[in-house]
Image (cartoon, rainbow, N blue to C red):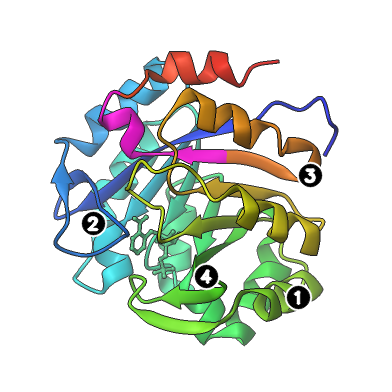
Amino acid sequence: MADTAKLELLPAVDVRDGQAVRLVHGESGTETSYGSPLEAALAWQSAGAEWLHLVDLDAAFGTGDNRELISEVARAMDIKVELSGGIRDDDSLAAALATGATRVNIGTAALEDPEWVAKIIAEHGDQIAVGLDVRGTTLRGRGWTRDGGDLYETLARLDSEGCARYVVTDIAKDGTLQGPNLQLLKDVCARTDRPVVASGGVSSLEDLRAIAELVPLGVEGSIVGKALYAKAFTLEEALEAVSR
Ligand SMILES: O=C(O)c1ccccc1N[C@@H]1O[C@H](COP(=O)(O)O)[C@@H](O)[C@H]1O
């Protein structure tokens, strides 16, 4: 990536039981509800977002799914959509791609079904990202409830299979407003030449500027969740903060 590129921002809409929610450390039961997912997504689009990070949390946790609602939201967007949660087999992948999402983010399946993930990377290329959701350097799957191997071993495997991009979440930071794990992002960027999307912990415009400093290392974007819903700053302010 060229050093002059600006950091992309991906406001998040995580859906649980039909509502836009934020979790703390991704733990089921910690939800704060923020109402209609479609209204939230449209608000981020109106505020100037170029991307929406849309997550079906029920599908990620295995507590059902919000497939129709997720599809409705994705189809209503004029902006790019990154779709996550419960994409683990041909049926769920087909449904995700049928929403018109620009790319889909694979978590659990990258840990539990490497052959399938290698196949879909080969078939769909840039439309597939892998979510590397970590505690320390241990990957977590199935709603972040189960260990799924070593971060760097998995990264090396996925790199060799041609994975186009990684979404790196520090679970210890996610939903806490405690700042991103910049060292983790630097460490991942040092181990891959593929673009990295940062996730977890953003609390301030300063945090976003700090992540933007990592663009020359390979950080392409940052997901922003709780800070927007908690009104720590507006999306307009965030976009301005990372514009160059
Ligand atoms: O985004 C969250 O807060 C979250 C919390 C707990 C589990 C998953 C979460 N989000 C994203 O869901 C996908 C993983 O889904 P799957 O394992 O492929 O079914 C991944 O992008 C997570 O970052």
Q: Residues within 10 Å of mark 2 (few under 14, many from 20)?
A: many
User: For the residue carrying disc 3, how many other residues have a C-alpha within 10 Å: few (<14), some (14-19), or many (20+)?
Assistant: many
User: In the picture, which quadrant includes the N terminus?
Assistant: top right
Q: Earlier in the sequence, mark 4 or mark 1?
A: 4
Residue name at image x 50 percent, y 86 percent: 112
Judging from the image, what secondary structure is the residue with disc 2 in? loop
Which residue is disc 2 drawn over? 66
Foreground: 225 or 24? 24
Disc 2 C-beta below 8 A from ligand 1: no
* Three-letter code, disc 1: Ala
Q: In which image quadrant can residue 29 be found?
A: bottom left
Badge 4 vs badge 2, beta-carbon distance below 8 Å? no
Label 4 SS: loop
Bounds of the magenta segment: 222-231
Residue 186 drawn at (x, y percent): 70, 52
Q: Is residue 16 above or below residue 13?
A: below
Mark nearer the N terminus (4 vs 3) = 4
Tag 3: residue type? Leu
Q: Quadrant of the C terminus?
A: top right
The residue singled out by tag 1 in the image is 156
Tag 2: residue type?
A: Asn
Q: Amino acid at mark 4?
A: Gly
Q: Residue furthest right?
A: 2
Seen in the picture, residue 58 relative to 31 is either above or below; the reply is below
Q: Mark 4 — residue?
A: 136
Image: 161 above or below 39: below
Whether residue 15 is in magenta: the answer is no
